[in-house]
Amino acid sequence: MIEPRPELSKLSDYVPGKSIEEIREQYGLKKIVKLASNENPLGASPKAVEAFHQIADCLHLYPRGDAPTLIRAIAQKYGVKTEQIVVGNGSDEIIDMVGKAFIRQGDNCVGITPTFSVYKFTTLSNGAEFIGVGEGDAKTSLDDLAKAIDSKTRVAFICNPNNPTGTYYTESEIREFLKKVPQNVLVFLDEAYSEFATAADYPNMFSALDEHPNLFINRTFSKIYGLAGLRIGYAIASTDVVRHLWKVKPPFDVNQAAQVAAIAALDDAAHVEATRKMNAEGIEVLTREFTALGFKVLPTQANFICVKIGERARELVSFLERNGMIVRGLTSFGMPEYIRVTIGKPEENEFLVMLVKKWKAEA
């Protein structure tokens, strides 16, 4: 028998939200709404779709691995140098590249918890220890996260807004944290949901990159731009950090369709604003409805809400699936009494509320 690396014994399989196909096969349903994976209910940017179709006759050609046109577009949007940008096959690959470039066996990484599981997965797969700080639905103090850093720490992971709670850190909180972090510790600021944030004090950290060369800002085209199926993410950091990531980056990981669609999506302000508007209205409606039903809804700056159902949360998730509604149970996040609900179209949100009311009435 071929023995795997010993680190694999510490890893658990990633648990994604259930797909529409899974529920259709399991229950034979025709109408299924998926509000489980924080996808854009309006779909992809129309400009991105048009760009995608226009390169159909070039699919036999390898993409440019350095994605120069896309990187120039990102640099122009955020006012940074092209040398400060790296792209990847989704944010997951960006996280993986950070692990390959900076995390060594015997190191540790710290992160707020509960949070996105890939941070821990990447840490453990590179032979390091993951130290989670925080629990439940309370917002983790960044002071506590700073105190967890020691001489073996290589990366500090902060998801802002946080998945799955929707909580966020202000610019002053993050800047104070950066002052306490040693320069040899990479601060991985994951802003996958940043474009949905409406709080006046939600941070713009690009201006801090020159002051803090260990700051690493991670973003994605999967959420507000609706390109989750094309798998494209990007990060902005110091030129020195980015230079090391290019050394471990696969040469053709970001496909040609993803590159042209992402460039077009960056230029589609109308789609972004329509998505933001629908999201804000959906948060208001679902928060009001779940609260009226007696459930606790956490304040959110993302495109989802986190709801405390109680000890029957799994039962509700199963009931919803049997009736054609997919939401995310949070047992894998260490929050078994909670569900995470992606904000959908008005009619999808109404369908969800109707089913939850039916479940509660029958109970």
Image (spheres, rainbow, N blue to C red):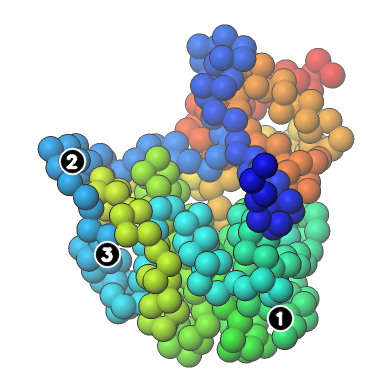
Q: Is residue 246 visible?
A: yes
According to the image, label 3 marks what residue? 66
The spot of residue 60 in percent (x, y) is: 18, 41
How many neighbours does mark 2 have within 10 angstroms: few (below 14), some (14-19), or many (20 or more)?
A: few
The spot of residue 80 in percent (x, y) is: 32, 78
Q: Is residue 201 visible?
A: no
What residue is shown at x 72% (from left), y 20% (from top)? 319
What residue is shown at x 74% (from left), y 53% (from top)? 10
Q: Are marks 2 and 1 in contact (CB under 8 Å)?
A: no
Q: Are marks 3 and 2 in contact (CB under 8 Å)?
A: no
Q: CA distance from mark 1 to mark 3?
A: 32 Å
Residues 249 and 21: in front is 249
Which numbered disc, 3 or 2, marks the residue closer to the eye? 2
According to the image, label 2 marks what residue? 60
Which residue sits furthest right? Answer: 311
Residue type, mark 2 in image: His
How many neighbours does mark 3 have within 10 angstroms: few (below 14), some (14-19), or many (20 or more)?
A: some
According to the image, label 1 marks what residue? 152
